[in-house]
Amino acid sequence: MGKALIIGAGGVGSVVVHKCCQVPEVFEEICIASRTIEKCNALKEKLDGGQTKIQTAQVDADNVDDLVRVINEFKPDIVINVALPYQDLTIMDACLATGVHYLDTANYEPLDTAKFEYKWQWAYREKFEKAGLTAVLGSGFDPGVTGVFSAYAQKHYFDEINYIDILDCNGGDHGYPFATNFNPEINIREVTSNGRYFENGEFVETEPMEIKRTYDFSEVGEKDMYLLYHEELESLAVNIKGIKRIRFFMTFSERYLTHLKVLENVGMTSIEPIMFEGKEIVPLQFLKAVLPDPASLGPRTKGKTNIGCIFQGVKDGEEKTYYVYNICDHEECYREVGSQAVSYTTGVPAMIGAMMVLTGKWKKPGVYNVEEFDPDPFMDALNKYGLPWQEDFNPELVD
């Protein structure tokens, strides 16, 4: 049916490649592209020989001309961007220059500022619309599935949704004293930034980790979780009818937070360049280099993730509560695709989002967040391709 160029060959990229190869009737050909061609070739060697034809390419995703070169050589129908968020705009520019649909899993953020906003990518709406191209933003899990869950709840269970709490629990244990489950640079920038939540038409800012709650997660148990800012709050505040408040919580162990605080206190989480032995380095990028590669955590991670959304609102004049969530087992993910569950829960929705575009279910000119499309075919695909969801109509509430 189509061809996909997958930019990024890390933990999430590996999952996307595996899952695309499971749907050869949609992904007839794929090209894996990265700055590190060896990673691309290793994935090709592992998966070659099936129905999906696989190519590889070396590309500098910071360079529009180089991206255009690779796109023109492979001629994909869609680019699946699982590179770094800093590279979203260059990849979008390359898609516009070559007439190719676009999809990513996280919104753009500047390299020198830990700031998560959709404004840079939303500014491309008219360009993609005029070009007749579809750009899907944030088709991971959160953002991504959380937006689809919200659209599904809005379509089937509510006349209006007043409150959304997004709960992200990773109950896995990789055995290291300290490691991050996805790109360390992005992860640490995210959790050391000020928290924010949406309430009564505006965002309220908090200190990092200032707001803490405890929640009993199905198949994981009771965990401490902390309010963070996550980009889907910005789009859901615009796209979901009746919203009064949206919050995002993520679980962290005391061990993780203690290590993080020490690293922050000694300056290792800083993104401000410093001089070291006559060369300029960014401390956080150096820290990333010495921490375990998230792609290496798969064989040693045990336990489960539980990620979902609790909705409160009104249906037919009556108050209603609804919780929809997915539970994912780290060891099962590793057995299937060689990754831990955090990469899996991001990579599977990226493949599904691209499939929605290629099959025409989510194809309309412009730039869109996932909750702006029909959620039903995506929800069906989650059950089919490894992320089955569960419902609870009387859940424990956060407050």
Image (spheres, rainbow, N blue to C red):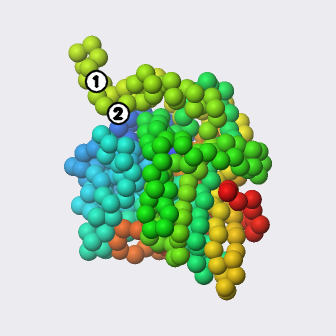
Q: Position of residue 52 (x, y in %)?
A: 52, 55
Secondary element under disc 1, as helix, strand or loop, is strand
Q: Is residue 362 above or below residue 84?
A: below
Rendered image: mark on residue 88: none
Marks 2,1: beta carbons within 8 A: no
Residue 296: give x, y in percent of width and height.
56, 31
Left or right of residue 269, residue 280 in this image: left
Residue 293 visible in this rendered orientation of the protein: yes
Camera-nearest residue between 224 and 367: 224
Residue type at mark 1?
Ile
In three-dimensional space, the C-alpha distance between marks 2 and 1, rounded to whole angstroms, equals: 9 Å
**Picture coordinates of residue 192, whole percent (x, y):** 46, 38
Residue at x-position 57% and y-position 61%: 146
Q: Position of residue 280 (x, y in %)?
A: 26, 23
Graded by Cα atoms within 10 Å as few (under 14), some (14 to 19) or many (20 or more), the crowding at tag 2 reads: some
Q: Quadrant of the C terminus?
A: bottom right
Callout 2 secondary element = loop
Residue indicated by mark 2 = 271
Query: In the rendered image, which residue does mark 1 sit on?
Result: 274
